[in-house]
Amino acid sequence: MKLVKEVTINEVGLRDGLQLESKVLTPEEKLDVFNLLHEAKVSEVEFGSFVNPRLVPQMANTSDFYSQIQEHEAKMELVALVPNLKGLEIAQENGVRTVNYVLSASNTHNQQNVRQTTEESLNSFKVLSQFASENNIGLNVTVATSFGCPFEGTVPQNQIMKILDTLLLHNINRITLADTTGMANPKQIYDLTKAVGDEWRNFEFGCHFHNTRGMGMANVLAGMEAGIRIYDSSIGGIGGCPFAPGATGNVCTEDVVHMLEEMGVKTSIDLDALIAASHKLKEILGHDLPGQVAKAGKSSRKFPVPN
Amino acid sequence: MKLVKEVTINEVGLRDGLQLESKVLTPEEKLDVFNLLHEAKVSEVEFGSFVNPRLVPQMANTSDFYSQIQEHEAKMELVALVPNLKGLEIAQENGVRTVNYVLSASNTHNQQNVRQTTEESLNSFKVLSQFASENNIGLNVTVATSFGCPFEGTVPQNQIMKILDTLLLHNINRITLADTTGMANPKQIYDLTKAVGDEWRNFEFGCHFHNTRGMGMANVLAGMEAGIRIYDSSIGGIGGCPFAPGATGNVCTEDVVHMLEEMGVKTSIDLDALIAASHKLKEILGHDLPGQVAKAGKSSRKFPVPN
């Protein structure tokens, strides 16, 4: 089994995770979780988004929250999602150093998500790219519904390749291929990420998986077999997309880190501190979270022998 | 990604699944689920166990239940778990055609499970093997804790190979390597099943996984990459072992079948009927089940576009 040797985790729980929760967390509650993620040595955190607060009230306090975590920027990459130029401008005003721009490979999903065609979002991207470059802001791009759309179904591989072609003409840090509603199977993950990796050997792609149909962890395995070394995941396995029906939690950070470390793939993350972060989040949200390792303990946990 | 082309599912929900449920199902309730499994064209069902009814009350009506499903034996393999010769004798009296004898690779787990050392269970196996052979009963063997023990931790590979060596001196249908408490990671699955497959090329091994730490589906993928074509799984993802602390549900049948069919690996199972069986089981048990596909629907499900 050929695998990558190390993996970078981009923790998206405070953004993708919280946006489907009915409880809106205060900046202080977000900080409680963030501090434990920081303690766990998580190196990248997508901490929020600059989107319409009426549409996604969970993200309304993103500016406030960022001002409380900004001091960690030297040692961590703190990323804000932006859906458009306005979001990027607000991010810039707040001093954000890295943003993640999202567009959907599927036209229908893009229209539901940002009320633009994919073509229009690609045009907006060019403007954002120039703004980011002029303001020295790192630009990541997430290509949503890369592995299928809940409205359109299959998204052809050449449609993805064409989008990547356009994106890669510009100056960007990273492209993340996202299985937004957990439709992808491991073979599909392997095939597409291998094709993309073979086509652009000098650019590093990430993946973003949801566990909607139980395939999330198998998809991480398949991605690693194809050479992908960057994964989005959310603490506790919370998450979803408010504009994608049927979407459920992201792959769970502590479950992914546990599996990788058990396999000898390095994450540089302190799993015990990560589990503590998951427990804290559960306490704040007041309900059970999908993650398994936070409940069962690590595989290395030994139980006392009953008398 | 090199995968097997087809897979046989051995449905263990009515045995491994139900034995951790607080509600004891009547034979009629079991039959309701079984009929839907039959409709879904599941070809192998572990329908119960002949164990001490005081210790595992959920299995006390196994004889009754078997008499109601026996007519399907021509088209389905109906398997009963037996922990010892007494269990096998009862199975024989009931006319059971195939039994599954379980022993643990880990001594401590074996003692907790059947109050014998692994060595003693291997000696018992020889007696059972002769009895089964004389009575024309098919004999499967499950090697529990093949990938780790909740009491002892790591189980060395040569310990497994030695047990297999002994088992394979006798006339048996199948050996299933079980990750009884969901400790195994995909690399470990791949390495051990590959080693076992390489050593005994003319014997077909199965695998039995639990999703305790979220690795169950990734382990199925790893097993298929190593050439394993037979998997135990439980409808709805229910399950566990009453004598193994921390154990939770088996990998979920409908989730496994969905993933495999999406990948082009044939199971010959009707997924829609399987999902109906899972819904029926949920209704009978009266609580939510761990399986994901029964909640989210298949990846191919298309959602209407909101106005």
Image: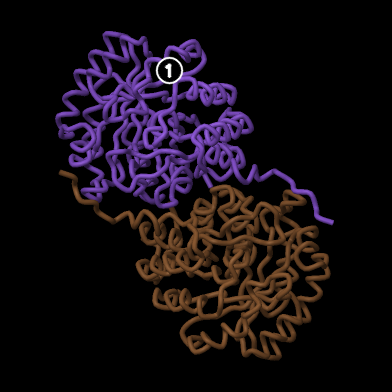
Chain colours: A purple, B brown
- Near-viewer residue (B297 or A222): B297
Q: Which residue is under mark 1?
A: A65
In the figure, residue A56 lies in which quadrant?
A: top left
Under tag 1, what secondary structure? helix
| Lateral position of residue B51 relative to residue A6, left or right | right
| Lateral position of residue B264 relative to residue A30, left or right | left
Residue A148 x %, y %:
28, 46
- Near-viewer residue (B115 or A260): B115
| Lateral position of residue B284 relative to residue A126, left or right | right
Residue B132 x %, y %:
69, 85
Q: Quadrant of the C terminus of chain B?
A: top left
Residue A205 x %, y %:
37, 32
Please, is residue A165 above or below residue B81 in the view?
above
| Residue shown at 42% from the left, 65% from the top | B279
In the figure, residue A270 lies in which quadrant?
A: top right
| Lateral position of residue B279 relative to residue A102, left or right | right
- Near-viewer residue (A24 or B106): A24
| Residue shown at 18% from the left, 42% from the top | A108
Please, is residue A90 above or below residue A60 in the view?
above
Residue B110 x %, y %:
77, 63
User: What's the amino acid at mark 1?
Assistant: Phe
